[in-house]
Amino acid sequence: MRRRYGDCVRQDGNCTLCNRVNHGRDCHDRKINHFVWTRMAAGLDQPTLAKAAGVNISQIQKLERGEIKIENLTAKNLFALADALGCDPKELVYGVTEPSNSEVEAP
């Protein structure tokens, strides 16, 4: 994974592991879109994710640039990306995970 900035303190350039960032914001306080954040947290670069999901790399690049929205993907591609990233498709679409039944308090 390449570094986002020349002054990056991490050799691997992984913003999700850096102690200088908050979730969704990089060390320069710029927003990182949720799809990019999820990919980086999974430790995958774009070509590796594309191959693992069987999705064209240009589609991943367009998602990361915000040219297409994740909710406009085909179900096949959405599920393939979620599987490759090790997350629930809802997390990709909505940006958050839903609480499990054990985390929900009974009335």
Image: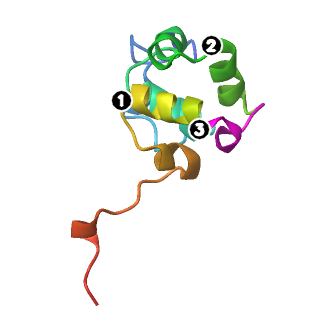
What residue lies at 36% left-to-right and 29% top-to-bottom? 17
Tell me which amino acid carries mark 2: Ile
Labels 3, 2: front one: 3
Is residue 49 covered in magenta?
no
Q: Which residues are magenta?
A: 67-74
> What residue would you read off at disc 3?
75
Residue 46, image quadrant: top right
> What residue would you read off at disc 1?
17
Which of the marked residues, 3 or 2, is nearer the chain's N terminus?
Answer: 2
Residue 66, image quadrant: top right
- What label sits on residue 57 in the rendered view? 2
Q: Name the residue furthest right.
A: 67
Q: Residues within 10 Å of mark 3 (few under 14, many from 20)?
A: few
Which of the marked residues, 2 or 1, is nearer the chain's N terminus?
Answer: 1
Q: Main secondary structure of the magenta part?
A: loop
Residue 1 seen in the figure: no
* Scheme by which the image is coloured: rainbow
